[in-house]
Image (tube, coloured by chain):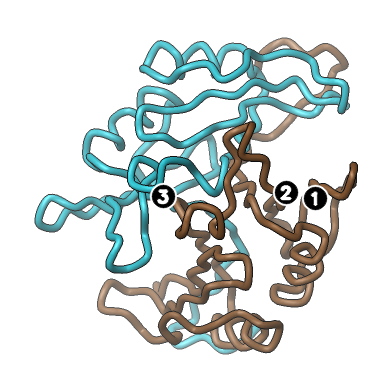
Chain colours: A cyan, B brown
Amino acid sequence: MGETSKNVVVRTNISPMLSVRRGTEAVEFYKAAFGAEELFKIEDNGAVVAQLGVEGSDFWVADESPEHFNFSPETLGGATVRIVLVVEDPHKMFERALQAGAKTVWPVEDQPYGWRLGRVVDPYGHHWEIGKPLG
Amino acid sequence: MGETSKNVVVRTNISPMLSVRRGTEAVEFYKAAFGAEELFKIEDNGAVVAQLGVEGSDFWVADESPEHFNFSPETLGGATVRIVLVVEDPHKMFERALQAGAKTVWPVEDQPYGWRLGRVVDPYGHHWEIGKPLG
């Protein structure tokens, strides 16, 4: 443990921050698609930064700002990171995402590498692999 | 909890999977930069998929495959997701990343929004915000 300025001890954590267009709308999409809850949100001049939690794990969503090297998939024509969402019931979460407006890239199936896994692309161009390891 | 085929109960988890060029080299970079340990790795025809852990949190690294919508930042000319790495000692982790070959985007400083935070770009074009909330 290193020094702290205010005696705050934090747990090491790695979370993706997704750059999007239409950030405010995107936050609502992710809440619907994954049952995410809003842990934090600020809006400034129409640009949003939000932290969303899904059953104890978290990710961030922010409006793109190319001047700060934050590009949406719509701007670049593709995504450089996909998000692996591990859940107990991949079929159920996958269906929920589709209902909210995600599109199937490939459906949930038991894969030869030992995962039950499918992939969607969301309306903002981010790709999600939804699944779990099969023990 | 949903049904399981093999009585495996999984914890919900969100992890980024970074698309890169030179994946095998990238895995070694991330081990050096963040003290990551290899949790899983497969190599097939020179393409790697690896899961790396940093003090209990994890991320994935995989060679890009544009035919499967997985693009590296080098291919697209930017990144669509940045990675938020929360650690107890941001200065120490930031310095470690620089020593391994990352470049400073902006240094670790106490930000007006209550985080001690800095940002690096790694040799594969992915951006990392390294910091922690200040209570």
Question: Can you tell which mark lies on residue A60?
Answer: 3
* Distance (Cα) linking label 3 and label 1: 23 Å
In this view, B2 is above or below A10: above
Question: Can you tell which mark lies on residue A21?
Answer: none
Q: Say which amino acid is labelled 1.
A: Ala
The answer for which chain carries disc 1 is B
Left/right placement of residue B127 relative to residue A50 reads right
Give the quadrant of the C terminus of chain B: bottom left
Q: Which residue is mark 2?
A: B62
Q: Residue at x 22, y 39 (%)?
A: A22
Percent x, y of residue A123 = 36, 27
The answer for which chain carries disc 3 is A
The answer for which chain carries disc 2 is B
**Dot 2, crowdedness within 10 Å: few (<14), some or many (≥20)?**
many
Percent x, y of residue B43 = 89, 46
Please identify the quarter of the rendering in which residue A38 is found.
top left
Helix, strand or loop status at disc 3: strand
Percent x, y of residue A42 = 22, 55
Assess whether mark 1 and mark 2 are in contact (beta carbons under 8 angstroms).
Answer: yes
Residue that lies at the very extreme toward the left in this rendered image = A45
Q: Say which amino acid is labelled 2.
A: Ala
Q: Nearer the viewer, mark 3 or mark 1?
A: 1
Helix, strand or loop status at disc 1: strand
In this view, A135 is above or below B24: above
Q: Residue at x 48, y 27 (%)?
A: A121
Query: Is the residue at mark 2 from the same chain as the one at mark 1?
Result: yes
In this view, A113 is above or below B57: above
Q: Say which amino acid is labelled 3.
A: Trp
Left/right placement of residue B53 relative to residue A57 reads right
Q: Which residue is mark 1?
A: B50
